[in-house]
Image (cartoon, helix red, strand yellow):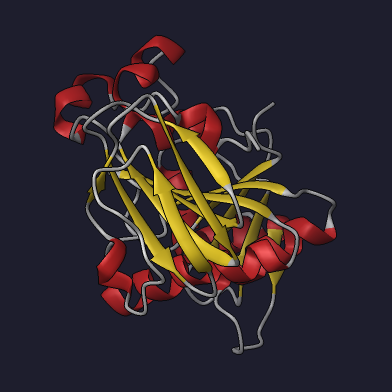
Protein backbone atom coordinates (compact mmCIF):
# COMPACT_ATOMS: atom_id res chain seq x y z
CA UNK A 1 0.00 0.00 0.00
CA UNK A 2 1.46 3.32 -1.07
CA UNK A 3 -0.40 5.52 1.44
CA UNK A 4 -1.66 4.90 4.95
CA UNK A 5 -4.38 7.51 4.49
CA UNK A 6 -5.67 10.31 2.29
CA UNK A 7 -6.81 13.72 3.49
CA UNK A 8 -9.50 15.37 1.37
CA UNK A 9 -9.14 19.08 2.09
CA UNK A 10 -11.49 22.05 1.70
CA UNK A 11 -10.38 23.29 -1.73
CA UNK A 12 -11.73 22.30 -5.13
CA UNK A 13 -12.62 18.64 -5.56
CA UNK A 14 -9.97 16.87 -7.71
CA UNK A 15 -10.69 16.07 -11.36
CA UNK A 16 -7.34 14.68 -12.50
CA UNK A 17 -7.19 10.85 -12.77
CA UNK A 18 -4.18 10.47 -10.46
CA UNK A 19 -5.58 12.16 -7.31
CA UNK A 20 -8.93 10.52 -8.05
CA UNK A 21 -7.25 7.12 -8.21
CA UNK A 22 -5.36 7.75 -4.98
CA UNK A 23 -8.61 8.79 -3.29
CA UNK A 24 -10.47 5.77 -4.71
CA UNK A 25 -7.87 3.29 -3.46
CA UNK A 26 -7.21 4.91 -0.09
CA UNK A 27 -7.34 2.47 2.83
CA UNK A 28 -8.45 5.32 5.10
CA UNK A 29 -10.01 8.68 4.17
CA UNK A 30 -10.18 11.74 6.40
CA UNK A 31 -12.42 14.51 5.12
CA UNK A 32 -12.02 18.05 6.34
CA UNK A 33 -15.58 18.99 7.22
CA UNK A 34 -15.80 21.45 4.31
CA UNK A 35 -15.09 18.59 1.87
CA UNK A 36 -17.34 15.96 3.42
CA UNK A 37 -20.58 16.95 1.69
CA UNK A 38 -19.15 16.54 -1.82
CA UNK A 39 -17.39 13.28 -0.94
CA UNK A 40 -20.62 11.87 0.45
CA UNK A 41 -22.68 13.23 -2.46
CA UNK A 42 -20.52 11.12 -4.78
CA UNK A 43 -21.61 7.98 -2.98
CA UNK A 44 -18.78 7.57 -0.48
CA UNK A 45 -18.45 7.51 3.28
CA UNK A 46 -15.24 8.78 4.92
CA UNK A 47 -13.60 7.07 7.87
CA UNK A 48 -13.37 10.33 9.81
CA UNK A 49 -14.60 13.89 9.37
CA UNK A 50 -12.34 16.50 10.98
CA UNK A 51 -13.25 20.06 11.93
CA UNK A 52 -15.59 22.11 14.07
CA UNK A 53 -18.63 20.75 12.20
CA UNK A 54 -19.81 24.15 10.93
CA UNK A 55 -18.99 23.52 7.27
CA UNK A 56 -20.91 20.26 6.81
CA UNK A 57 -24.63 20.16 6.05
CA UNK A 58 -26.98 19.63 8.96
CA UNK A 59 -28.26 16.41 7.38
CA UNK A 60 -24.79 14.90 7.05
CA UNK A 61 -23.73 16.25 10.43
CA UNK A 62 -26.58 14.32 12.02
CA UNK A 63 -26.29 11.21 9.84
CA UNK A 64 -22.53 10.87 10.31
CA UNK A 65 -22.16 12.30 13.79
CA UNK A 66 -20.35 9.11 14.83
CA UNK A 67 -17.60 9.94 12.30
CA UNK A 68 -17.25 13.60 13.21
CA UNK A 69 -14.11 14.35 15.21
CA UNK A 70 -14.77 17.89 16.43
CA UNK A 71 -11.77 20.14 17.03
CA UNK A 72 -12.90 23.66 17.78
CA UNK A 73 -9.54 25.41 18.30
CA UNK A 74 -8.75 28.01 15.65
CA UNK A 75 -4.95 28.07 15.85
CA UNK A 76 -4.61 25.51 13.03
CA UNK A 77 -6.64 24.82 9.90
CA UNK A 78 -8.61 21.66 9.20
CA UNK A 79 -5.89 20.22 6.95
CA UNK A 80 -3.40 20.41 9.81
CA UNK A 81 -5.92 18.96 12.25
CA UNK A 82 -6.42 16.03 9.87
CA UNK A 83 -2.67 15.39 9.53
CA UNK A 84 -2.14 15.59 13.29
CA UNK A 85 -5.03 13.19 13.84
CA UNK A 86 -3.50 10.68 11.43
CA UNK A 87 -0.09 10.96 13.09
CA UNK A 88 -1.73 10.27 16.45
CA UNK A 89 -3.12 7.07 14.90
CA UNK A 90 0.33 6.00 13.72
CA UNK A 91 -0.39 6.80 10.05
CA UNK A 92 2.65 8.60 8.62
CA UNK A 93 2.40 8.03 4.86
CA UNK A 94 -0.22 10.61 3.96
CA UNK A 95 -1.55 11.92 0.65
CA UNK A 96 -3.43 15.21 0.57
CA UNK A 97 -5.74 16.21 -2.25
CA UNK A 98 -8.41 18.86 -2.71
CA UNK A 99 -6.14 21.39 -0.99
CA UNK A 100 -5.85 23.95 -3.80
CA UNK A 101 -8.29 26.14 -5.68
CA UNK A 102 -10.94 28.43 -4.23
CA UNK A 103 -9.34 31.11 -2.03
CA UNK A 104 -5.72 31.75 -2.92
CA UNK A 105 -4.66 32.58 0.64
CA UNK A 106 -5.93 29.19 1.78
CA UNK A 107 -4.07 27.52 -1.08
CA UNK A 108 -0.78 29.21 -0.15
CA UNK A 109 -1.27 28.30 3.49
CA UNK A 110 -2.02 24.66 2.70
CA UNK A 111 1.05 24.32 0.49
CA UNK A 112 3.45 25.99 2.93
CA UNK A 113 2.24 23.74 5.77
CA UNK A 114 3.77 20.71 4.05
CA UNK A 115 7.15 21.66 5.50
CA UNK A 116 5.64 21.71 9.00
CA UNK A 117 4.22 18.22 8.47
CA UNK A 118 7.62 16.93 7.37
CA UNK A 119 9.12 18.40 10.54
CA UNK A 120 6.47 16.50 12.51
CA UNK A 121 7.74 13.25 10.91
CA UNK A 122 4.87 12.91 8.44
CA UNK A 123 5.76 11.49 5.02
CA UNK A 124 3.32 13.62 3.08
CA UNK A 125 2.57 14.46 -0.56
CA UNK A 126 0.01 16.93 -1.92
CA UNK A 127 -1.57 15.93 -5.23
CA UNK A 128 -3.31 18.63 -7.28
CA UNK A 129 -4.92 18.49 -10.72
CA UNK A 130 -1.63 19.67 -12.23
CA UNK A 131 1.15 18.00 -10.27
CA UNK A 132 2.48 16.96 -6.89
CA UNK A 133 4.14 18.92 -4.06
CA UNK A 134 6.82 17.05 -2.11
CA UNK A 135 8.46 18.49 1.03
CA UNK A 136 12.15 17.61 1.06
CA UNK A 137 15.34 18.04 2.98
CA UNK A 138 18.95 17.57 1.93
CA UNK A 139 19.66 15.41 -1.16
CA UNK A 140 16.78 13.91 -3.18
CA UNK A 141 16.48 12.25 -6.60
CA UNK A 142 13.26 11.92 -8.61
CA UNK A 143 12.21 10.16 -11.81
CA UNK A 144 10.93 12.39 -14.60
CA UNK A 145 10.82 12.76 -18.37
CA UNK A 146 12.83 15.21 -20.47
CA UNK A 147 10.84 18.41 -20.79
CA UNK A 148 8.78 17.83 -17.66
CA UNK A 149 8.44 21.01 -15.60
CA UNK A 150 9.71 21.21 -12.04
CA UNK A 151 9.68 24.00 -9.45
CA UNK A 152 11.81 24.26 -6.31
CA UNK A 153 10.64 26.49 -3.47
CA UNK A 154 13.29 27.18 -0.86
CA UNK A 155 12.55 27.32 2.85
CA UNK A 156 15.75 26.80 4.85
CA UNK A 157 18.08 25.10 2.33
CA UNK A 158 21.62 26.22 1.61
CA UNK A 159 23.97 25.11 -1.11
CA UNK A 160 21.15 24.34 -3.54
CA UNK A 161 22.47 22.59 -6.63
CA UNK A 162 20.61 20.63 -9.28
CA UNK A 163 21.50 17.85 -11.71
CA UNK A 164 19.34 16.97 -14.70
CA UNK A 165 17.66 20.39 -14.85
CA UNK A 166 17.81 23.11 -17.52
CA UNK A 167 18.42 26.03 -15.17
CA UNK A 168 20.96 26.20 -12.33
CA UNK A 169 19.78 26.46 -8.74
CA UNK A 170 20.91 28.85 -6.04
CA UNK A 171 19.86 29.67 -2.50
CA UNK A 172 16.61 31.28 -3.60
CA UNK A 173 15.15 33.89 -1.26
CA UNK A 174 11.78 34.26 -3.01
CA UNK A 175 9.35 31.49 -3.94
CA UNK A 176 9.10 32.50 -7.62
CA UNK A 177 12.85 32.24 -8.24
CA UNK A 178 12.90 28.45 -8.43
CA UNK A 179 9.74 27.98 -10.49
CA UNK A 180 9.40 26.70 -14.07
CA UNK A 181 12.57 24.68 -14.31
CA UNK A 182 12.68 21.68 -16.63
CA UNK A 183 14.04 18.15 -16.61
CA UNK A 184 16.69 17.23 -19.19
CA UNK A 185 17.03 13.53 -18.36
CA UNK A 186 15.07 10.60 -16.93
CA UNK A 187 15.74 11.80 -13.40
CA UNK A 188 16.87 14.90 -11.57
CA UNK A 189 18.70 15.39 -8.29
CA UNK A 190 18.65 18.27 -5.85
CA UNK A 191 21.63 18.63 -3.55
CA UNK A 192 21.23 20.90 -0.53
CA UNK A 193 21.40 21.15 3.23
CA UNK A 194 18.04 22.08 4.65
CA UNK A 195 14.39 22.16 3.66
CA UNK A 196 12.72 22.91 0.36
CA UNK A 197 9.55 22.07 -1.53
CA UNK A 198 9.48 20.38 -4.95
CA UNK A 199 6.58 20.62 -7.39
CA UNK A 200 6.60 18.14 -10.28
CA UNK A 201 4.03 18.86 -12.97
CA UNK A 202 2.02 16.22 -14.76
CA UNK A 203 3.04 15.97 -18.40
CA UNK A 204 -0.45 16.23 -19.87
CA UNK A 205 -3.17 18.66 -18.83
CA UNK A 206 -6.19 17.07 -17.15
CA UNK A 207 -8.44 17.53 -20.21
CA UNK A 208 -6.26 15.14 -22.21
CA UNK A 209 -7.42 12.34 -19.93
CA UNK A 210 -10.80 13.72 -18.98
CA UNK A 211 -12.63 10.69 -20.40
CA UNK A 212 -11.04 8.63 -17.64
CA UNK A 213 -11.61 11.17 -14.90
CA UNK A 214 -15.02 9.89 -13.95
CA UNK A 215 -16.35 9.81 -10.43
CA UNK A 216 -13.87 7.61 -8.69
CA UNK A 217 -16.37 4.95 -7.70
CA UNK A 218 -16.44 4.11 -11.43
CA UNK A 219 -13.56 3.73 -13.86
CA UNK A 220 -10.16 5.08 -12.92
CA UNK A 221 -7.02 4.78 -15.05
CA UNK A 222 -4.65 1.89 -14.63
CA UNK A 223 -1.02 2.22 -13.63
CA UNK A 224 -0.05 2.31 -17.32
CA UNK A 225 -2.20 5.40 -17.89
CA UNK A 226 -0.72 7.19 -14.90
CA UNK A 227 2.83 6.45 -16.05
CA UNK A 228 2.09 8.20 -19.36
CA UNK A 229 1.72 11.62 -17.81
CA UNK A 230 3.65 11.28 -14.57
CA UNK A 231 6.45 8.68 -14.76
CA UNK A 232 7.76 9.74 -11.35
CA UNK A 233 4.55 9.22 -9.42
CA UNK A 234 6.02 6.26 -7.54
CA UNK A 235 8.85 8.52 -6.32
CA UNK A 236 6.21 10.89 -4.99
CA UNK A 237 4.67 7.94 -3.21
CA UNK A 238 7.37 7.75 -0.58
CA UNK A 239 10.20 6.39 -2.68
CA UNK A 240 13.09 7.68 -0.61
| Residue depicted at x 38% and y 51% | 199
Name of the residue lying farthest toward the left: 207
| Residue depicted at x 29% and y 36% | 183
Query: In this picture, is 144 found above or below 15?
Result: above
| Residue depicted at x 20% and y 30% | 204
Residue 201 image offset from top left, x and y in percent: 30, 42
Report how many numbered discs are placed on residues in the image. 0
Residue 104 image offset from top left, x and y in percent: 27, 74
Left or right for 23, reference 118:
left
Residue 1 image offset from top left, x and y in percent: 69, 26
Residue 125 appears anywhere in the view: yes
Residue 119 image offset from top left, x and y in percent: 70, 68
Left or right for 184, reference 124:
left
Query: In this picture, is 57 found above or below 97?
Result: below
The C terminus - image quarter = top right
| Residue depicted at x 35% and y 69% | 107
Query: In this picture, is 226 found above or below 184?
Result: above
Query: In this picture, is 29 found above or below 194?
Result: above
Q: Nearer the viewer, residue 223 or 188?
A: 188
Left or right for 135, reference 203:
right
Q: Nearer the viewer, residue 132 or 107?
A: 132
Left or right for 62, reference 191:
right
Q: Nearer the viewer, residue 144 or 10?
A: 144
Amino acid sequence: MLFDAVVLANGEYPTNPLPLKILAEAPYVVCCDGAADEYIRRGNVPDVIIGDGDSISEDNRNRYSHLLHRISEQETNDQTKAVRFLLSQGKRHIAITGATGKREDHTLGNISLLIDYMRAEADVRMFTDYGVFIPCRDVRTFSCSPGQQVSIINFTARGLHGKGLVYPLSDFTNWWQGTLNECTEAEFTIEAEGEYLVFISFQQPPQRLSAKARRFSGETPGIEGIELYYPGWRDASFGE
